[in-house]
Image (cartoon, rainbow, N blue to C red):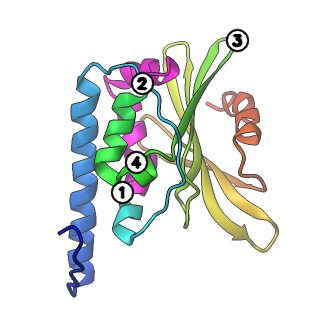
Amino acid sequence: MKGHTLTINTTPMDQKMRARSGVCRLALVAGMLMIAQPTPATAEPAAPTVTSASQFDLIYALHHKVIPGILFSDKGTLMFDDLFAGRTETFHTMVLSGMGSAYADGITISRDHQPAVDMVLISFPDPLVEPACFHAILVRQGSAFRYLTLESGGNTGGQGLITFLGEWTRDGKHMNYGPRAYRDMASFKNEVPALLQRP
């Protein structure tokens, strides 16, 4: 209902069901788009905003479920190769269809090659609440993938520890490597060699 305001009183269960429906929609779009061959394109970032709790649920799902879910699936190589080559249209379309242009256009994607390691660096719009991510790094080492995250963590203990370093594993486990005092991609990327030494 564009241009109109509709207020509906909902219970917490209604809100959970709507959020779950949105997450399912995003996952379905992700699956459909990763099957299609993408057209080369790059997205220019714009200033985004997060406007609702249900949108935050979708953002959480994108950061913590959808991206690693695709990366560790049979479509992982396709997604990684496309993003590493700068073909971001399929990824952008997936996010756009789930969360709109303000959020989708605020995502930046770049790549980095180091000896024996390729990385796709994804920077998201600044998260408003934890544990949404500032950044994620998709790593390919040989034929194995890793999915690393730099998550919002508030100011832990008032000590300037504003993020948490994390990882999602192939079997769906979330690893927490502790709080950090930075939020920039360069500092995050500098931790990758040490993280790759972990099993």
Q: Is residue 198 left or right of residue 63?
A: right
The CA distance from mark 3 to mark 4 is: 29 Å
Disc on the earlier residue, 3 or 2: 2
Q: Which amino acid type corresponds to the residue marked 4 in the rendered image?
A: Leu
Disc on the earlier residue, 2 or 1: 2
Q: Which mark is residue 62?
A: 4
Q: Is residue 151 visible?
A: yes
* Residue found 35% across the figure and 52% down from its top: 100
For discs 3 and 2, the disc positioned in front in the rendered view: 2
* Residue found 21% across the figure and 68% down from its top: 17
For discs 3 and 1, the disc positioned in front in the rendered view: 1
Q: Which amino acid type corresponds to the residue marked 1 in the rendered image?
A: Leu
Judging depth in this view, the residue of 118 and 126 nearest the camera is 126
For discs 3 and 4, the disc positioned in front in the rendered view: 4
Vertical comparison of 40 with 10: above or below: above
Vertical comparison of 26 with 142: above or below: below
